[in-house]
Structure formats: structure tokens, C-alpha cells
Amino acid sequence: LLAIKGGPNNTIYVARDLPAFFSSEKVVRLLRDNARDFKQTSKTLIITSPVRKLPPDLERDVTLLEFELPGRDEIEHVFNKLYEPHKAKIGALSDDERERIIQAAMGLTTVEAENAIAKAVVESVSQDKKVRPPISKLVLKEKSLAVRKTGILEYFEAAQTADDIGGLENLKHWLTMRSKAFSGKARAFKLPMPRGMLLVGIPGCGKSLSAKAASNIMGVPLIRFDIGRVFGGLVGESESNMRLAVQTAEAIGSCVLWIDEMEKAFAGMGSGGSTDGGTSQRVFGNFLSWMQEKTKPCFVIATINRIEGLPPELLRKGRFDEIFFVGLPTPKERTAILRIHIQKFGRNVADFAKEFDQMVADSEGFSGAELEESVVTGLYDAFYHDRELTSEDILKAIRQTNPLSKSKAPELNAMVQWAETNAVNASRVENEKASGKTTAGRQLDI
């Protein structure tokens, strides 16, 4: 920087990766001094960096230019450049497969896309044609590794479907309706892109499971956003990480962006109790602005286990299309959940029919996770005694369990009371004697 200060006028200087030294007060001071001198000497300093790290002291002296991730046309150019010279060896590709390859590389930088497609092509042609996997599938595999390198986003291949969710019919129907919004027909109809949904409710009742199943219901990839990893120790690092995360998610194209247990990152914002110099407030503000203004087909699903301390701005209409309350399962839903888990472990549900009503009755107040654990505990008991699983094994496990609805009753009751006026019930209650804990929230007219 001293050499630039004493260098010739009317010159453009380029400093690569200089932000790595922004933690030094001396470096920042020299930059500010140079900024003033450059106005009289016709010098220009261009600073390049893969991430946005700008100290507050320099914000007024620096013009910021941000380059977006490559769009579809650029990715297609990268693919054609790699495919055309080797077309004879690779073989002809259908238009659908070409489009899948391009979409699979969306969200990567140009270099990452080149590497992913090149490796996928080499891996594909090195295998026998009879067992050769589609190039698009191999590119997706490479993209999942590239996305994971951010340390903030993770590419999920969710196997869960709507059939794996016991109950929550209102939620599943709503997701099915929104799934049609990603089509070209919806664009022609001028239908706005869905923003997302907020799932509030009791732990272990299917919020995370619903987020995973949503990607298959909608037919789009699932990206998990660990929002707690956004926060870094360097000045401006947290804001930069948030911008990188949302920019990558948007560049991927149609996807479900899953933010699990959001309250861990943003709880306390509403009370103004932030003690990190305002970093959390700025990151939170950036996230809200993006949620409000985004136009890309990135469907956000956020889950929350606790409502205490959540900022009201997060819950107002316009951020999410809908807020669902996921409460304790009704008797009908407990029946469905027990069936799913008994079948999942390779047992015939008919063998448990005699005691099924008793299992449902004894598990009043159980969450879906507690019902699953009762089946698992029964399996362990049966295996230990070297015999097949029976209804008595599951009943024994149920009766030995102290459900969360009893151990955390005050907190859960407060959440149910909040949901009565602030959320839609994810479950459909039809002529069923269910406890007040399961009927919170408005019902959808479907």
C-alpha cells in the first residue's frame, strides 16, 4: 500500500485477496489515506476477493461490485464446451438429459461447474454403457460436495415422501397445491412464486420429516441451511456468509431451502438483547429483506420448536405464505404413525391388530418421535429375549415412557394457546375426540 501511494499517477492497481488483512488497523488506515490521495492523483485501486469483507471504516470510500453466480445460459455454454468435442465417445443425449445436467450444475461457480461436469463425463464414459449412470446424476453428486464446502448449506437427497408422514393432512394438501406453482403453466398464469412456510410446534411431531418430504412432494432438490453457521468472528463475515447462502440457493433454481430450529439463531431479537455489536440484527434484517423481496423459485421451510423471544417481524404475513402448527397427533394420526413404524421394521401390521386400539389409547399425549421410540424399544426387548416382536412389547415401552407433553406441559400449553390465533393446524380434525393439545390453530377449508 505504501508502494501504491508513492507510485505513478494515472494508474490502475490490482490487489488480490487484500481483505485477508483487514483485521489490521494499520492496513485500514493506509487504505483510507490512499482513498483520499487517489482523488487528486487519478489512481484507482481494484481489490478482488471471493468473499465480501469490508470494515465499516471503509464502507464510504469503496464502491462495491458483486458478481452473481452463473445463470442458465452460462452453465449451458460450459456444458457444450465440454460435451461437443467428446460427443462421439459420450453418445447422444436427449434434450431432457441435457436440461437435467444444466439444472444440476446451477448454483455452482463457473470453475465448479466445469469441474463437476468434466468429472461426471469422465466417470460416465469409463463405465460400461449397460450400467452407465446418467451424467446429470453424477453432476448432482458433485454439486452436493461443492455446496457442502460452504459449511453453511448442505445438499440433501431426501427419501421421505408424503406416505411417510402419519396424519398432518392439512399440511400435505397445502404442499401438494403449492407444488404446481413451479411449472411453466403457472408462469403463464402469472402465478407468483410461493415464498415458503413456517412450521411451529412440539418437538418430535414431524416438522423436520415434513420438510424432507416436501422436496419430493414438490419434485425439487432439498438444501439444508444451517443458519447458525452464518455467524463468524471477522468484521462483515456474518453478513457475507448470509449473502453467499441466499445467492447460492437462488442460483440452484427450484429448490426447498430447509432451515431447521430457526429459533436457535434468531431467538431474542424481539427483545433487543443482542450483545454482538448489532451483527445478529443486521444478519436477521438481511434475511427478512430477502424473504420479502425474493422472486426466484426457492421455497423456504423453517421449523421452530419454541416461540419465546421470536421477533414479531418474522411471523408477519408476507414473509411466509403460511404458518402451520404441528401439534401432538390425534388418535387417528397415532394409528397411522404406529402402522408406519411397525411396517418400517418389516413387521405385518395385522399381527398387532388385537391390541392396536389399546396402543393408541395408552399413547395419548405422545409425539410421533415417542411413538417410534416405543416401537424401537419393543424391538430391543424382543431381540434380547430371542423372540418375535409382540403388541405387549410395544405396550410395555409406551407405559414406561414419560412423554414430553407431561414433562414440559406448561411450555407446550403456552405454544398451543399461541397457535389458536396465529397458525393453521397442520392436522385435520374430523369428528374426533382429541385433546385440546392437538386441535390448536385454524382449520383449512379443503
Image: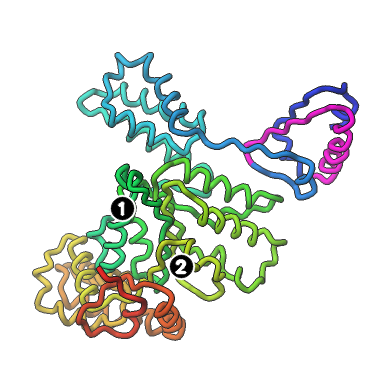
> Residue 33: within the magenta?
yes
Q: Nearer the viewer, residue 264 or 344?
A: 264
Element assignment for label 2? strand
How is colour applied across the structure in the image?
A: rainbow
Amino acid type, label 2? Ile
Instruction: Residue 193: give x, y in percent of width and height.
Output: 40, 51
Q: Position of residue 276 (x, y in %)?
A: 69, 62
Q: Can you see residue 22?
A: yes
Marks 1, 2: nearer the viewer: 1
The N terminus, quarter of image: top right
Query: Dominant secondary structure of the magenta stretch?
Result: helix
In 3D space, how far apart are the residues under numbered discs 1 and 2 (Cα atoms)? 23 Å
Residue 46 in the image, given as x and y percentages of width and height: 73, 31
- Residue at x 47% of width, y 34% of height: 71
Q: Could you tell whether 364 is left or right of 59 in the image? A: left
* Mark number, residue 304: 2
* Quadrant (top left, top right, bottom left, bottom right) of the C terminus: bottom left
Quadrant hosting residue 87: top left
Say if 149 sits above or below 361 in the image: above
Q: Are marks 1 and 2 in contact (CB under 8 Å)?
A: no
- The circle on residue 167 is none
Q: Residue furthest front?
A: 189
> Which residue lies under the disc numbered 1?
179
Where residue 373 sits, quadrant-wise, is bottom left
In the image, residue 300 lies in the stretch drawn in magenta: no
**Label 2 neighbour load within 10 Å: few <14, some 14-19, many 20+:** many
Looking at the rendering, the stretch of residues picked out in magenta corresponds to 24-51
Task: Inspect the image, locate mark 1, and give the three-letter code of the amino acid beneath it.
Answer: Ser
| Residue at x 61% of width, y 68% of height | 269
Q: Secondary structure at mark 1?
A: helix
- Asked whether 78 or 145 is in front, the reply is 78
